Image: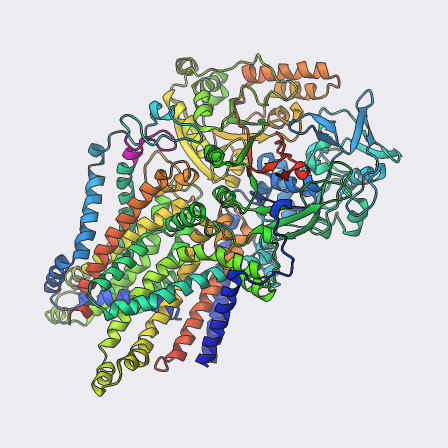
Amino acid sequence: MLRVVVRRLLQMVLTLFALSVLMFAWLRNLPGGPAIAMLGERATPERVAALNHVFGYDQPVWVQYGRWLGRMLTGDFGTSTSSKMAVARELSQAFPGTIELSFFALAFAVALGVPLGYIAARYQGRPLDSGVIIGTLVGVSVPVFFLGYLLKAGVAVRLGWLPPSGRQSAALDATHVTNFFVLDGLLTREWDAAADAFMHLLLPALALGTIPLAVIVRITRASVLDVLNEDYVRTAEAKGLRRQTIRTRHVLRNALLPVVTAIGLQIGLLLAGAVLTETVFVFRGVGWLLADGIQERDYARLQAIILLAAVVYVFVNLIVDLSYALIDPRVRVK
Amino acid sequence: MTLGALTERKQDRLDRLAAASAESGGASLLMDALRRLVRSPVAIVGGAIIAAFVLLAAFAPLLAPHDPGVRYDELIDLGTASHIPDHAPGFPLGADNLGRDLLSRLIYGSRQTLFVGVAATLMGLFVGVVLGGIAGALGGWVDAVLMRLTDVMLAIPSLLLAISLAALASRPNQWTVIIAVATIAVPIFARLLRGSMLAQRESDHVLAARALGVREHTIVLRHMLPNAMSPVLVQATLTLAVAILDAAALSFLGLGDQDTHRAEWGLMLGEAQRYLDVRPGLAIYPAVAIVIVALGFTLLGESMREALDPKNRR
Amino acid sequence: MQARRLKAAVAVAAAVTLAVTGCAESKRGGEKSAKSTLVFGAAGAPETFDPTFATDGETFRVARQMYETLLDHKPGTAELSPGLAESWEPNDDGTAWTFKLRENVKFHDGTDFNAEAVCFNYDRWHNLDTEAAQAQAIYYLDVFGGFKSNKGEYGETPYVGCEATDTHTAVIKLKEFQGKFPAAFSLTSLSISSPTAMQKYDADNVVQEGETFAYPDYATKHPTGTGPFKFVKYDEANETATLERFDGYWGGKAKLKKLLFKTIPDENARKQELQAGTIDGYDLPSPADYQTLKDEGFKLEIRDAFNVLYLGINQRGPAKELSDIRVRKAIAHAMNREQLVKTKLPEGASVATQFMPDSVLGYADDVEKYDYDLDKAKALLKEAGAENLKVKFYYPTEVTRPYMPNPKEIFQVLSDDLAKAGIEVEPVAKPWTEYLDAISQTRKHDLHLLGWTGDFNDPINWNGTFFGRGQKGFGTEGMKDMFAAIAKADSIVDQAEKESAWQEVNRRLLSEWLPAVPVSHSPPGIVVKGNIKGLVASPLTAEKFNTVYFS
């Protein structure tokens, strides 16, 4: 197992290096750039040249890349041109937001999806089953941003039940320790801050969790159906075990394996969905930073986010593989 | 190098679909599947939606009361910065933000939406089938390299990839959207076709043909490819739904076509963001249209997949 | 093990529930009576809290609450008024400005404001000596053109020195008269900071780090001015700047206890936050929402327009015909600006006849107006042999500016107009920074949309910015007459003479040169809750919140 982990990490470093070179080459060749972003309407060629000189943009590309790599290795990702904050810092604040959001979205999807899928399988072919299946198909056909907009306009603006955007109300003046706002509220015992952050999470989590929910329902259903037809379940039935025991001990437990994989797969999708959801809810997470960074041509930020996404993805992959091996001893890590 | 369980899941799904083509006597299988398909109410609903959508697109010039690209003075003059008329004589749904006829734009929008979806799917299909076909037919290191490539592409969340690609374009237009959306479909089709070819390699009808001395490229073109087509068709239907949704998402993020003379639902939805309070209809009509059409393709595609899945033929 | 996990999960759930029901009291003592705290929705995060190094309106908005300048503006107007200086006087040739300073003014750190503090600030700017600091002092550069020792391709500064002739008299000496004075003394970037705090917190130590700049503690944690509010903190994670009332303020003390600026980058989200009641007001509501906001009982203040939107015409772009003034005039006649203003721009917007609003000195009523006239446009095109004119029309996407609330729509309208006159338009859309790059650094475009919000009330800030020298955007490099006329008008000390010189410049700009077509002036709005009183909308978007209170 250790060898696998080491090999994976090595692969990761290589991949990241290749990716960083590509990113750098691409981003440096875009027109625009931080000097223009900073100067706006007053961007005269002389001013732009002066700023570019300060930034070292008039140096050869490989020199720029070398410097950038050197800084990056020391944990310095540069400064965002749109927020004027250190990118590392910006990410350390936004990333917990995205994790929090994804966590709640996933929690919602799993908590609702597994039981629904199980019920659909139990009542296979009956109206309840068809209803659930059609519901999931509708769920995947609604664009995330449109669903987000409907939720925002309906629940937040019209009904006023939940806050329409952001991560926390400004007027609270909450203390932040970990930048997981809900957790911060609990840690500092600022209960109102935790509650406020939690309320801010509900709608985006609902919007973001819909597609994973649909997927989890379908996979759970399929998986439960597979297991129900397995010999050991028939054997258990034949042995006269109590239904309840069969369900929890044999069916659910075995049926959950593919579901775990599917959940892992959803994490990657959540990151992509987060771009849209966070944009709709102006939720300052990594997805929002990315969308904003694209618009503002914020080189430093884009490089860091793309590298971060790659790292996260590889790690999640690794973790899912390992946990797969833990849950099911039959699966040997190759 | 393996990218782990995550991509394996995606691959599994594709491989299972591909396996359908390996069954000998593909034709009878197809008939069998078709028979099950027409009995499925889900498939019928999906098919009906798609038929309506295609008819709307085909006959848009006959159905639309006005030219979708023209700004009508009678509508322009009714509007101000904070008012957009929602009806006017001769314009049942009123104007869009620039004084064009909303109804006509919705009708014509079906054309453009269908065009973007189909073009992206076909482009992805073509490249994917060529790559997958080459990999499946040649095997060996070509196969290994191509499949590693598709693995990597499958590993990246597709929408993220599309966003990155669309953002590359310095002048976003409908073709950059089509290319971005097509690109994420390529590995799917490549993997699917390759799986299908591999599955057939050892199947009875191919072995029989080989024993009869039929030349290898004839086997590939005459026997293997046609059999692989039904899973590809299923996947194409599903991909169309995703393509329409992803194109809409790109438009929403401002990465879509910048020329609003052309009516396209995703674009109309993106443009309507400023008028959500003033004229929610500007956003809601195209959004609902997108949902219905995407649903249509998903319903049909999923029921086709289910009908073809060997597992459902116990 | 599983049981333990379950218990942990239950505990977390319980804690969350507890939090939701809110039965515990925060130790911050929760200032729940929001009546003394105002939360304002900002469109962007402040870049820094030292306005010397700032360029954007959101940064200035926060700075204006904490700092003051020598000269100010009468509330609600662009007219100069006393600020930290009670009076000001130039010598005869305009090379020395004497400021009589206000007495009994304290900085937030308790030190005294006096003539030495003023000179300390002006000398500080003049002596900025690192490449990074100089490149970032953008407004100072705009006004003074250079530093004591330039670390870049800057010009020669007219600044000679500043002398504190007594405790409350400061004299700023210049090499030559420039028309932008005294108006430029009101620029927020030239705010007076506490010398003690600047020294203590290393104010000049701007460090260039990779692509941008890192600011010293002075600019991030200890900004110290004389304004009605003082800095408390900036919460980066939640993008909120917190200010509180400065009780030692010399003038009308702030009625609010706390003033928060919360960044909400999305226009729609700002509106919804206001509707949901989580913020108390925001700037630049979309004109599309004016009616909705008013209907819902919010108070919408419309400022006087202190901006201009123009259609830039590139005389050295791909379409060579544009170097012919008849073709440029044809374009001006083809544009139905009346209709654009009426149907797509906010209420109170007007058609621009020249490149400055009428509140600026030198505005001329009798410039050539270019009414909408398709026949005339076609005739002019024919006369110039440009019937087959084909233009690349650049416009920005994903951006709103006060003078250009929706570039895409404005583009569509104008390009349709041009098409009606038989001009073939090739649209080129680009994201904002790429757009600016394309239209200011290249010659690929023929037409472009851009505008300007005035920094101070002097014609040099308008005509001078656009046409005072050659610009690639207009391809005006060869128009020496124009540059000379503008330079001459700027050098006149006498107000009446200056005015007529600028009026002449405006007339010639429109009839003789026409490097661009003025399109419109759009009054930017600001919206607050219905129960907020005392907000005076400023054409310079320089609202001060010390007069604001909840009723």
Count how many numbered circles sit on residues in the image. 0
Image x and y of residue B181, in percent = 34, 51
Question: Which residue in the rendered view is the most extreme toward the bottom?
Answer: A239
In front of the other: C526 or B249: C526
Nearest the eye: C200 or B204: C200
Q: Position of residue C52 (x, y in %)?
A: 70, 41
- Looking at the rendering, in which quadrant would you find the C terminus of chain A? bottom left
Res C94 quadrant in image: top right
> B279 and C252: which one is in front?
C252
Classify C15 as above or below B294.
below
Q: Position of residue B294 (x, y in %)?
A: 28, 50
Horizontally, residue B87 falls left or right of residue C289, namely left
> Which residue is painted at 20% across and 59% down in the image?
B303
Quadrant placement of the N terminus of chain A: bottom left
Per the rendered image, the range of residues in magenta is: B92-105
Above or below — where is C323 with respect to A152? Answer: above
Residue B97 seen? yes
- Which residue: 36% across, 65% down? A112
| Residue B96 magenta | yes
In this rendered view, identify the residue nearer to me: A275 or C229.
Answer: C229
- The way the protein has been coloured in the rendering is rainbow
Question: In this image, C386 relative to A247: left or right?
Answer: right
Position of residue B248 relative to residue C534, above or below, is below
Q: Position of residue C325 (x, y in %)?
A: 50, 17
Q: Residue at x 67, y 43 (%)?
A: C256
Q: Above or below — where is C334 with respect to B33?
A: above
Examine the structure image and report whether residue A111 is included in the region drawn in magenta: no
Q: Is residue B174 left or right of residue C517?
A: left
Task: Look at the image and tell me whether residue B143 can be seen.
Answer: no
Q: Decide whether the magenta segment is chiefly helix, strand or loop.
A: loop
Instruction: State left or right for residue B265 relative to residue A1.
Output: left
